[in-house]
Amino acid sequence: MGRRDKDDERWQEIKKKVRKRDGNRDRILKIATAKEALFLAKHAPSSLLKLLDCAHLKPVGRYPHLCYDMDNIYLLNRWSHENLDSCKNPFTGQAISYEEREAFWKRIAGAVIYERLEEKIKEVRHGRDGQEESGSLSEQSEDNRGTA
């Protein structure tokens, strides 16, 4: 997978679509409880809260076929994006488990879209005869802790 930058026209177009879909607003704030939002406002660097990134739910390095899939991309503030990529709580920055990180992503994407994305991964992992081509999703997930 090549670098997604200003020269990647497809990536630039997807970013525009994601920003439009998300109303150019941070998806973290959409799912935050009042307590989470208050903590974020008080403790996260304001410079990073102002920067909005198109963040991949499933890491592109592991799932390159999902690089341009809008079900896999959400507009997040830089602080929360970096924390989720590092397997940290997107509000507090505290270390969390892979399962806890996935639970945050499920909140961000919504259960229906999250499950649809999981199905897309399963479809690619299975060959035509229905045999798995690689390890189970949980094994892959363990290999992928802390990356996004």
Image: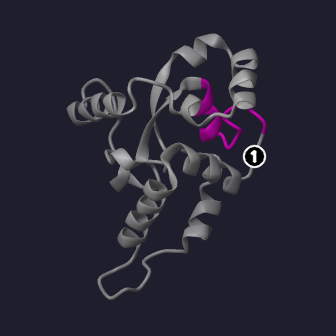
Residue type, numbered disc 1: Ile
Q: Can residue 103 be seen?
A: yes
Could you say where residue 35 lies in the image, as x and y percent from the top left? Answer: 75, 29
The residue sitting at the bottom extreme is 129
Q: Can residue 147 be seen?
A: no
Quick check: 138 above or below 3? below
Q: Is residue 90 magenta?
A: yes
Quick check: 35 above or below 46? below
Specify whether 12 is left or right of 44.
left
Task: Report which quarter residue 45 is drawn in.
Answer: top right
Q: Is residue 48 magenta?
A: no
Could you say where residue 66 lies in the image, as x and y percent from the top left? Answer: 36, 52
The residue sitting at the right extreme is 94
Residue closer to the observer: 146 or 14? 14
The residue at 58%/37% (across/down) is 31
- Please provide the residue range marked out in magenta: 79-94
Task: Report which quarter residue 125 is drawn in.
Answer: bottom left
Q: Where does the C terminus fall, quadrant-wise? A: top right
Query: What is the crowding at mark 1: few (fewer than 14 residues within 10 Å), some, or many (at least 20)?
Result: some
The residue at 61%/69% (across/down) is 139
- Name the residue tied to disc 1: 96
Could you say where residue 48 lies in the image, as x and y percent from the top left? Answer: 59, 17
